[in-house]
Image (cartoon, rainbow, N blue to C red):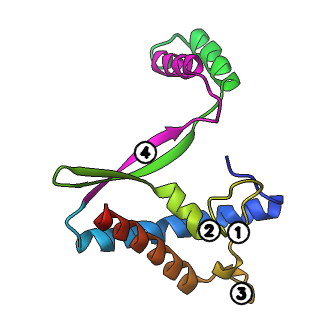
Amino acid sequence: MLKFETPQARHLADQLMQPALIRIIDNIRKQLEDSDWRGTYQETQIWPEGTSAAILQRFKELQSQLSQATPEAAEAMRAELAQLPQPFPGYELHLTKAAQTRVVDVWHLCYCVCFQAYPVSEGPVRVDDSIIDRELNDVDWLVLDQKAKAIVDEVFSQLGAA
């Protein structure tokens, strides 16, 4: 779970994530066009740290039963679900080449674009101010694209070395 220094930093990060995702996906597409690797995307669920297997199982049971429950039972299930830890959406790139497979966490790449020195060992993340055009108070698209390209290039260079 990301920790932010201030609510303003969180708001700024929220504004940067969509443009970062778009640039990461576009740079992955460009790399795949010139590569022997094939990629597919898969949505995943990321659970809060410390979520037990029993809680995961109960969450899945309730989710599967919800669509066929009576209105009264469904209301009780939703109330119970609301009390359980909630997963965060994850997004993975599954790469294959012959018998080789790799999984890349796309959100991790976006975090690397948006934050300074990500991942951080402790403390809050810091938004990378270099991708903000302070005069326009908007995203510096050129810097954002260059950083996203460099991060994706690094991922694909490591594939070649693996």
Position in image of residue 58 (x %, y %): 55, 16
Q: Which residue, given by chain and number where applicable, does mark 4 sit on?
A: 43
The CA span between labels 3 and 4 is 34 Å
Q: Residue at x 50, y 38 (%)?
A: 45
Mark 3 surroundings within 10 Å by alpha-carbon count, few (fewer than 14), some (14 through 19), many (20 or more) = few
Question: Would you name the residue on which mark 3 appears?
Answer: 136
User: In the image, is residue 31 part of the stretch drawn in magenta?
Assistant: no
Residue stretch rendered in magenta on the structure: 38-65
Q: Which mark is residue 127?
A: 1
Q: Is residue 19 toward the left or the right of residue 129 in the image? A: left
Name the quadrant containing residue 8.
bottom right
Label 4, label 2: how far apart the Cα atoms are: 21 Å
On the image, numbered disc 2 is attached to which residue? 114
Horizontal side of 150 relative to 129 (left or right) equals left
- Contact check, label 1 and label 2, Cβ < 8 Å: yes
Q: CA distance from mark 3 to mark 2?
A: 18 Å
